Amino acid sequence: MASRIIVLGATGYTGRLTVAAMVAQGLVPVLAGRNEAALLALQTELGEGLRAAAVPDIAIADIADQASVSALVDEGDVLVTTVGPFATMGTAALEAAISRGATYIDSTGEPSFIREVFEDWGPRASAAGIALLPAFGYDYVPGNIAGALALHAAADQGDEVTRLDVLYAVRGSLKTSGGTAASAAGMVVARGMGFRGGRIIEERPGVRTWAAPHDDRSWQGFSVGGSEHFTLPRLSESLLDVGVYLGWAGGRSEQAAKAAAVADAVTRLPGAKSAWSFVSRKVVPGSSGGPDAAERANARTLVIAEARTLRGNLVSHVALEGPSPYDLTAELLTLTASRAQQGLITKTGALGIIDAFGYDDAVTAATSLGLVEVE
């Protein structure tokens, strides 16, 4: 194929998982980053046993140097970026993709950045004929799939859904990677969002909590911003409220929500945001590894979605389970990049998985990656 897949941040934790998944699927990604020695080591590792034409190339680029990132891509290429925190490091790849005519895919889970992509960069991409696919990992593809399934089930029954809630949880224990921790620290001072009354609103994390039933137990989570706030209303004109909840704190979700309220109040004080950003960079420096294969094998993704009518009546309940969040993210980025390289993503602007794949293909793709409906 004339187009290439370029993975920016290839030597980071999520980047390494992603390029390994790509090579396993027979793809030949370009490994991009700022550390040449690390890239060469990864190239050697991935190239063992491969024929010469299947060994990934490397490219040097630094997100602090826009020209170097733009030089990575040509028209028709696919740029996959795992470099975060995206709120502070994400725009270079967006600018490169739109200006150079490349499909853009990222692994962000940061609500403020997702909102920026959909509201600010999406119209630019649409005008340029470019597709932007943000948050194409554990955050927030499974919730998009579960939400779409719940809406589809409700439509089959003839019910009009006005409220849709999605909760992300993990079966088993799983520590977070350094990159995930850095992104979470940044979310404390970033603007939050929700979808209420048929529109996007400003809303700090943890304003709401929700307990979702599954497997004879209650899975608790606190509210966060997600791509679902932009993408699921596109699937149903009747939707007025979309809730996205993070359940990693489990039974401590109420305490986490209260802590989020305190953090929001404190960071509104003069100079507090700058101070927090400085401290968090020192305490949580970013990419510093993550759970190994054995640890990931002990964790499973769980996503629950419920659709309700205006009167609050439950009309559909969906639960999906799949591989660990980090493995699922790598496989989703790989599958999406492959489809983009094949020219199978034809819509433009900022897209969710249903926009980009279509409902049937999105559900089939999720199933192929082990993300299956269990309830």
Image: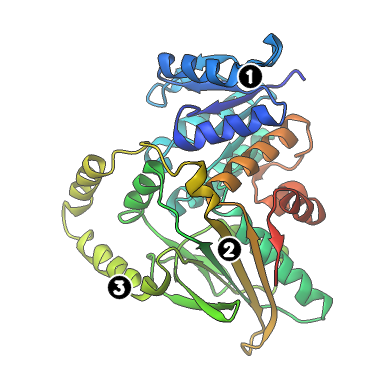
Q: Residue at x 40, y 51 (%)?
A: 175
Indicate left or right for 12 with 43 as reference: left
Res 26 quadrant in image: top right
238 above or below 284? below
Q: Which mark is residue 258?
A: 3
Asked if the residue under mark 3 is in contact with the one under mark 2, i.e. CB atoms within 8 Å, the reply is no
Give the image location of residue 214, x and y in percent: 60, 76
Q: In the structure shown, which secondary structural element does the residue marked by tag 3 occupy?
A: helix
Q: In the structure shown, which secondary structural element does the residue marked by tag 1 occupy?
A: loop
Cα separation, mark 1 vs mark 2, equals 38 Å
Q: Residue furthest top?
A: 52
Eye-nearest disc, 1 or 2: 2
Give the image location of residue 62, x and y in percent: 41, 22
Q: Residue at x 64, y 44 (%)?
A: 332
Residue carrying label 2: 302
Amino acid type for the residue under numbered disc 1: Asp
Quadrant in which the N terminus is drawn: top right
Res 48 quadrant in image: top right
Give the image location of residue 360, x and y in percent: 82, 55
Give the image location of residue 287, x and y in percent: 37, 36
- Asked whether residue 71 appears in the rendered view, the answer is no
Cα separation, mark 3 vs mark 1, equals 47 Å
- Asked whether residue 336 appears in the rendered view, the answer is yes
Amino acid type for the residue under numbered disc 3: Lys
Q: Residues within 10 Å of mark 2 (few under 14, many from 20)?
A: many
Residue carrying label 1: 74
Amino acid type for the residue under numbered disc 2: Leu
